[in-house]
Amino acid sequence: MFGMGSNSRSTDVGFDENPVLREQVEENFRFAAAASVAGIVNAAIITAVLWSPQTVLTLMGWVSAITLGTGLRFWALVDNKRDIQKQTPATVHARRIEFVALTNGLAWGAGTVLFTLFANPTQYMLLLMVCSGMMGASVTTYTSMARAGVLFIAPLALGGLASLWVHPSAPSISGTLLLACYCVLLVRSAKVRERRFRARIQAREELATSNETVKLLLNDFEEQSADWLWHVDRQGLIAAPNKRFCEAAGRAEALLENALFETLFTDSKERVMLHEHIYGSFGFRNLTLKLVIDGAPRWWTLSGQPTADGGMRGVASDVTAQKRAEERVSYMAHYDGLTDLANRFLFNDTLRRALKRRGKDHQVAVLCLDLDSFKSVNDSLGHPIGDKLLCEVARRIEKVVREEDLIARLGGDEFAVLLQGADAGARAEKIADRIIETVSDPCVIDEQQVVTSCSIGIAYSANDDADPTLLMTHADLALYTAKENGRNRFAFFEPGMDKAAKERRDLEMDLRAAISLNEFELYFQPLVNIDTGQTVSYEALIRWNHPTRGIVMPDDFIPIAEESGLIVQLGEWVIRNAAREVANWPEHLHVSINLSPAQMRSTNLLPTVFGAIAQAGIDPDRLELEITENVLLNDSAVNIATLHKLRDFGVRISLDDFGTGYSSLNYLRSFPFDKIKIDKCFVSGLADNPDCQAIVRAVTGLASNLGMVTTAEGVEEESQLELLRNEGCTEAQGFLFARPGQSSQFTDLRVNPKAQPTSGVAMLPAAKIDLTSTPSRSIEETGSEESKSDHPAAQRKARG
Ligand code: C2E
Ligand code: CA
Ligand code: CA
């Protein structure tokens, strides 16, 4: 048994047949040294007490046996100590221990019997005391190994028993009974202690095994998922960081090990929470923390649970992508994608919060800003340049405000600036001035020079209006006024603007109702040939018979109709009714109809015009459509195509109000107009402004070269007519001839039944004005190809 050296098992590296037994052995070895020392001390005492010439030999023999037993125990102990890799199986050690116990037991048992023979009563007493002491102590020495304990106790007890019967002064019977009870108690106690010890070890082993299983599962989890595990000790220091953790943190294991976990993360309230959870040993879930790895910000979400050792273990996942997506969404929800300025949502939100804080030292001012000619830039130069212009405007505004002022793009070409602070009201005016100046500075975009300007409305928080919507409405009203006053300027909100806006709103509501209530009427004003003095056509001018306001002039409601989109419906009504009217007039008279830009954009325009002509049964060239230069600016390509379709059908096209707006003689070349109407501002200036004369001369000259008729508007005086005649103008219109009036007022509009044309096209009865009638049919519906060729327009075209 002792021959089984550790070398013989060298192939079984790490072999451990029974972990519980191993623990039992180890536990026993823990007491081995103390037990040996105790044994030697006891043996020394007995030797000293019994020392006499007669006992020398016996004592020498016994001490040798004890020394051998103790030596064996030491050898076993040292051998186990040396066997670091535990190559000698626990069973071998157990046998050794049992052998040593038996050897020692036998030595002590034999000694007890032998020395009884020499001992006087006092010495015998001592011998019995040592003997029972050794037996009692053995229960502790052999706590983990009951069998070895029994092997030690049994020979000792037998020796004791023999001595009871050998020594003359010993109480043989009572001593035997006592010894028996004592032995039963000791053996039982040894067994119970061993069982408890084994149970404890077993439980620990099971725990270790289950920990191992958990570990395996966790490893599995680490390999499978994108998440990783972290573990900190009770001081919050990282313990055994795994590979995934190191990879995620972008740091070497050596750097992470024992580093303070929380210092990985950037300072934040979440980091404070992490600190509190770790040191307070509170479990937590889904705490998202920011950290910087290789200079780039990243986010981890952590969950953790306290561990038995007072530390904490948990799972971490990198949620950077998700966080970035969230940030992007949040950015998009708060910022304008084109200019990177705040959007309406963020602006309103900031304004709301600013107004809550307002007071004497905290004023709030809002500047609402709108580019004056953005649409024409967009239309003429294209959307990409329009977009770049918006960005350029944004950058320029940024330069004239302070860092803390909020600039927003509210949509389209609308911007807003929010000023806060004690001086917000005073700064508003200066900033508005500087914005107007910087925005109107020409800029070059994609090698194109772009000139724009802006109008600004300013409102600021008075003492008690804390309503953000109201403040914005006020700024809007001020902006509207700035535009009304001629653009490229700013206006402060004034209480009166509220009233004007309310009137406007009321008017818009009335306008909607007016369409269904048939409150409109067409007035007519003659256009006279300057040479012959003959009326050649009448311009249809709309009037609104308002039930309470009386007659409302078009300048007061057409802009509202245009803004609200009602103009399309209203315009269709004008076209149909003008066509019906002209059908009743002598055939040489034409009717001119004003078209708004919004009508030009309407897809219903062509069907309406063609339908009205067909319904009225008139020659298309009796209709003249008057458009303004704006139409050539906005969506010009589409509009020019529409104009061509109308002209191809036979309808005449006039350019109205020429000389106002974005006038350019080039417009005269962009479309072959039938007529140019020179705006009344030139006519009124004819007498004393040489510029006006020059312009009228240039226009009439160019127009006659291009084969166009020229009509001078607003002719009020004979002298004006004379000058126009001299400049070669073809027609004139104005109060000098007649003010606009109902058709019944003009005698030349009454057709003499006997003089009716044979074609009968003008025979339709006078139209009853009906705004609710269905929209006109399209040209395709008005007749076949054949019937189209019979159409006066087609005939006119055929005639050339
Ligand atoms: P417009 O097309 O330039 O029409 C001529 C305007 O000049 C008319 O004003 C007319 O009354 C006025 N007028 C004529 N002769 C003289 C004159 O000798 N001196 C002065 N000072 N004014 C003169 P009205 O009727 O108030 O119309 C204003 C504008 O409203 C029109 O200007 C036209 O742009 C628009 N409008 C009128 N009817 C319609 C319509 O049915 N549809 C559309 N879209 N616009 C219309
Ligand atoms: Ca007109
Ligand atoms: Ca005009």
Image (cartoon, grey):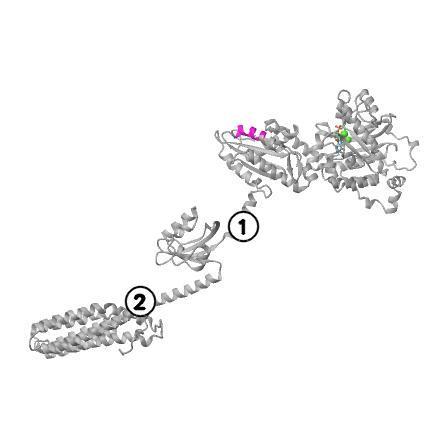
Residue appearing at x 43%, y 55% in the figure: 251
Label 1 sits on residue: 325
Where residue 314 appears, as percent x and y from the top left, is: 42, 57
Res. 491 image quadrant:
top right
Q: Ligand 1 falls in which quarter?
A: top right
Horizontal and vertical percent for residue 445?
64, 39
The label shown at residue 200 is 2
Q: Residue at x 9, y 71 (%)?
A: 49
How many neighbours does mark 1 have within 10 angstroms: few (below 14), some (14-19), or many (20 or more)?
Answer: few
Which region is colored magenta? 424-433
| 133 horizontally vs 413: left or right | left
Instruction: Residue 188: give x, y in percent of width and height.
Output: 23, 72
Q: Is 292 contained in the magenta span?
A: no
- Residue 567 appears in which quarter of the rendering? top right
Secondary structure of the magenta portion, mostly? helix
Total numbered badges shown on the rendered structure = 2
Amino acid bearing label 2: Arg
Q: Amino acid at mark 1?
A: Ala
Between discs 1 and 2, the one toward the N terminus: 2
Q: Please tell me whether residue 428 belongs to the stretch shown in magenta.
A: yes
Q: In the figure, is residue 266 to the left or right of 57?
A: right
User: Can you tell which mark lies on residue 606?
Assistant: none
Q: Is the residue marked by circle 2 packed among few (<14), some (14-19), or many (20+) residues within 10 Å?
A: few
Left or right, residue 448 beside residue 300: right
Q: Quadrant of the C terminus?
A: top right
* Mark-to-mark CA distance, 1 and 2: 53 Å
Q: Nearer the viewer, mark 1 or mark 2?
A: 1
Q: Residue at x 39, y 59 (%)?
A: 240
Q: Quadrant of the N terminus?
A: bottom left
Q: Could you say whether the residue bearing mark 2 is in a helix, strand or loop?
A: helix
Q: Is residue 390 visible?
A: yes
Residue 342, placed above or below residue 699: below
